Amino acid sequence: MTTPITPIWKQNTDLDRINGWNTNTAMEVLGIRFTAVGDDWLQGTMPVDHRTHQPFGLLHGGASVLLAETLGSSAAMLTLDPEKELTVGLDINANHIRGVRSGIVTGTARPLHLGRTTQVWEIRIENEDGALVCVSRLTMAVVPARVIGTNVK
């Protein structure tokens, strides 16, 4: 028997609201969109095109990392009350498994650890066939909101 998952989110997870965070950012320029949210995961997509290619026509590893950090850091923020706490990135790593030349990649962020002062997220990025393209681990620091402030609404 499977135990039901308790949602981890402390904020409204409306996708229109979360996608609004991308306005006037690198995420908007690269076409990153949040597309789905579950009880303990956040998913988003990014096109593989001239904006995200490296010189040899493949998905740029840095673009994959930008997608991973976008998903993981946004998910981390959703687990907190932004009036009290915020998250900032401490470390990210990525293993690039498979090249992609075109289409859409989909990333899914899931927590590995949700602590009082740190969070660790795993982000898996897959191609349109569901094959693993990149796996990333993101460590976030949880800090008092007064330390950095926010414009996230």
Image (cartoon, grey):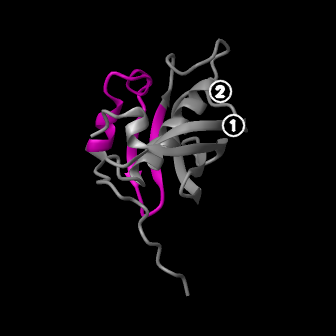
Is residue 34 on the magenta stretch?
Answer: yes
Which residue carries the number 1 mark?
94
Residue nearest the observer in this picture, 69 or 117: 117
Query: In the image, what residue occupies the spot 29% across and 54% down?
Result: 12
Query: In the image, which residues are magenta?
Result: 17-46
Quarter of the image where one finds residue 86: top left
Instruction: Say what amino acid the circle numbered 1 marks.
Output: Ala
Q: Is residue 128 above or below residue 51?
A: below
Look at the numbered disc 2 and give the secondary structure of its residue: helix
Q: Is residue 114 left or right of residue 58?
A: left
Confirm or deny contact between disc 2 and disc 1 (CB under 8 A).
yes
Which residue carries the number 2 mark?
61
User: Disc 2 to disc 1, how far (Cα)?
Assistant: 8 Å
Look at the image and tell me whether residue 59 can be seen: no
Residue 61 x %, y %: 65, 27
Residue nearest the observer in this picture, 47 or 26: 26
Sequence-wise, the earlier of marks 2 and 1 is 2
Q: Is residue 24 left or right of residue 41?
A: left
- Look at discs 2 and 1 and give the one toward the viewer: 1
In this view, the residue farthest toward the top is 55
Residue 98 x %, y %: 71, 36
Residue nearest the observer in this picture, 106 or 13: 13
Look at the numbered disc 1 and give the secondary structure of its residue: strand
Query: In the image, what residue occupies the spot 47% across and 73% down?
Result: 5
Q: Is residue 54 left or right of residue 34?
A: right
Quarter containing the C terminus: top left
Residue 96 x %, y %: 71, 35
Residue 141 x %, y %: 55, 44
Instruction: Say what amino acid the circle numbered 2 marks.
Output: Gly
